[in-house]
Amino acid sequence: MVMPENEVICTGMIDRIGLETSNITFKTASNSYEEILPVHTHKIGLQKVADMLLDAEKGVIKTTSEITAVGHRVVHGGSYFSNTTIITEEVKEKIKELSELAPLHNPAHLVGINVAEEIFSGAKQVAVFDTAFHQTIPVEAYKYAIPNFLLTEHKVRVYGFHGTSHKYVSEKAIGYLEKVSRIITIHLGNGCSMTAVKDGKSIDTTMGFSPANGLVMGTRAGDIDQSVIFYMVKNLGYTPDEVNSILLKQSGMLGLTGYSDLRDIEAKAEEGNKDCQLALLINAYRIRKTIGSYTAALNGLDAIIFTAGIGENSSYMRKLICTDMDYFGIEIDQEKNQIRSKEIREISTVDSKTKVLVVPTDEEYEIANQVFQLLNN
């Protein structure tokens, strides 16, 4: 069963919550609203969303009771959740317990759930877990080479993230290309990850026990030799919490360049900034290297998919990544690569053995669809 209608009734976003000013956008088919004002907490922000939905002129509902379900993206479901789940007090406790593994995400998700329960008190609250799509990864890929009890007793393993996005774009690509079974999806935003998808199922992914490892990200270091952590603690005098903060919030593109927004980094690189030029090369190199390893894991490659903010919008990064990849049958058409569109599009050359697609992700639709599936089955 699929949702009877795919029409988006309204969209909105609040970012920079807790800062001096926050940006609020809200759009319906007939109205558009934008405001800059301080939103100090998630509760204030979600209440503002409810007010907009109920607005006599711009809103789309008359009472909050019209909202029958609220879907929540939750980054880490650990080994507890492999499917979309109706939220109970027990589920909230598990999400809280997993906050240690996703400290940048799960605590905020829990706040959002609690506030949504207050505002939309008659609605079912449903969690869609980013880790769920990766539950098909085989044991040889998800198990670390550490003592067995750490897996059996403490569930230390690869979980993978961005699963909602990887699932959505891989299914779109399979539908678009029809005869493909071996795909690499490349989700590039402030957080970055790649997934090897075989016959529609995730078989490996770059993020692991937490969303901290894998590719170079906006502020996260990605893969790093664990000896560096011990060196920083034992020899440089950092506390474990300080090292954790450095690796999560002060590293990645920010640590390499002083900027975390790729638009700024690309602009500075074009102006001749050496740090920015090198950071882009480092980023692209790690992605190319992962394409190679995932091609081996898939025993071949039919298509690669670019998605998310950077993947969809940065023709420069796509060009860097696909340069000198002819051994893998990857060749992009530079004119097609420059096209900006909200539609799925092919940017590979006619002769490219591997298809290269840009597929705009739609995690909101995927969350809504999974909520609908759960409540109607």
Image: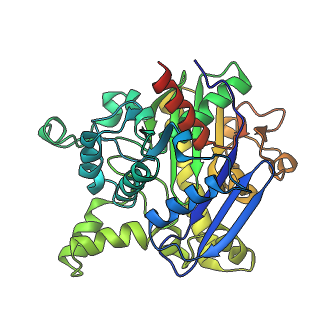
Q: Residue at x 24, y 47 (%)?
A: 93
Is 141 left or right of 203, judged from the image as shown?
left
Is 168 left or right of 234, judged from the image as shown?
right
Is 67 left or right of 100, judged from the image as shown?
right
Given residues 331 and 175, the one toward you in this image is 175
x and y, in percent, of residue 74 in the image: 41, 46
Note whether residue 323 is visible.
Answer: no
Q: Quadrant of residue 136?
A: top left
Colour approach in the figure: rainbow
Note whether residue 135 is visible.
Answer: yes
x and y, in percent, of residue 213 in the image: 40, 54
Given residues 213 and 98, the one toward you in this image is 98
x and y, in percent, of residue 331 in the image: 75, 41
In the rendered image, the vertical position of residue 29 relative to residue 190, given as above or below: above
Q: Quadrant of residue 245?
A: bottom left
Q: Residue at x 68, y 52 (%)?
A: 59
Given residues 193 and 141, the one toward you in this image is 193
Q: Residue at x 51, y 36 (%)?
A: 68
x and y, in percent, of residue 9 in the image: 70, 43
Q: Quadrant of residue 102?
A: bottom left
Please identify the quadrant where the N terminus is shown: top right
Furthest-right residue in view? Answer: 335
Q: How many marks?
A: 0
